[in-house]
Image (cartoon, helix red, strand yellow):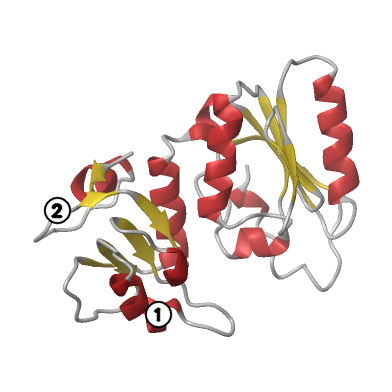
Amino acid sequence: MSISLAELLAKANIATPLTQNPGITGISDYSSRVKPGNIFVAIKGYQLDGHDFIPEAIANGAAAIFAEKNITSPVPVIVVPDTRIALAELSNAWYNFPAEAMTMIGVTASNGKTTTAFMIDHILSEYFPATGLIGTVIIKDGKTAVSADLTTPNSRELYEFLAAMDQNQCSHVTMEVSSAGQQLHRIHGIPYKIATFNNVSREHIDFHYLEKMI
């Protein structure tokens, strides 16, 4: 798949002037995984700052950079207030807004997310041919299941999983939504139809934003 940068930005509703309009072949927030034609989104983490890896991304063939500050670069640099939000918006547009075709169910809590999500998915599976599940233990795309790395994947991976579920004709997707998943905008852009808020402990109370899900 390839799309021009201008076309992708228009799909993602990101308005910015461009002096170059390269073809885009994908999106990455890992500089070491950048392939020729990819957009590299520089994410500032708790320990590492993706902005420090922009030269590596360009060396690997990045066609454009999303950053939170101006940098000198031979490829277009789009400066945004929050690159985590930009990553979600770009990924959502890249995968053609897959969540909109399915009934999205979010399960958030300090404890019990996995049990609740499995119970909901099990019930749905009795009534619908294909359902999706995203959580701490597994990610099920309607055909296969793989082990999960994070309770709530980062937004680029999340939208890739949702695209597979849409392609596999999943009608419903149940997903665990962690405190970090909300705080770090991993679920940005997902139109939840149903949200459950089971409980919250003191360690998570500052990180829950239920309004992001409903």
Q: Which mark is residue 151?
A: none
Give the residue displayed 71% in from the left and 59% down from the top.
150
Please, what is the three-letter code of the amino acid marked with disc 1? Phe
Where does residue 180 sit, x and y in percent of width and height?
A: 67, 65
Quarter of the view holding residue 208 = bottom right
| Picture layout, residue 82 above or below residue 132 | below
Residue at image position (86%, 38%) is 118
| Nearer-the-camera pick, 35 or 29 | 35
**Other-residue count near label 2 (Cα within 10 Å), few / some / many at <14 / 14–19 / ≥20:** some
Helix, strand or loop at mark 2: loop
Q: Which residue is mark 2?
A: 21
- 77 or 37: which is nearer to us? 37
In the picture, measured across the screen, residue 50 lies left or right of residue 212, that is: left
Q: Could you tell me how far apart the alpha carbons at marks 2 and 1 are, in whole angstroms?
A: 22 Å
Q: Residue at x 63, y 55 (%)?
A: 153
Where residue 65 sits in the image (x, y, percent)?
Answer: 29, 67
Residue at the (53%, 83%) spot, across then down: 48
- For the C terminus, which image quadrant? top right
User: Considering the numbered disc 1 on the image, is that residue within a helix, a strand or a loop?
Assistant: helix
Task: Out of 78 and 156, give the one closest to the viewer.
Answer: 156
Left or right: residue 112 compared with residue 73 = right
Task: Mark 2 or mark 1: name the one nearer the start of the chain.
Answer: 2
Q: In the image as oriented, which residue stretches furthest toward the left?
A: 19
Query: In the figure, is residue 71 to the left or right of 128?
Result: left
Left/right placement of residue 18 relative to residue 186 reads: left
Residue type indicated by callout 2 = Asn
Disc on res. 53: 1
96 shown above or below 180: above
Q: Position of residue 189 (x, y in %)?
A: 50, 45
95 relative to 148, above or below: above
Query: x and y percent of residue 105 in the render?
Result: 70, 36
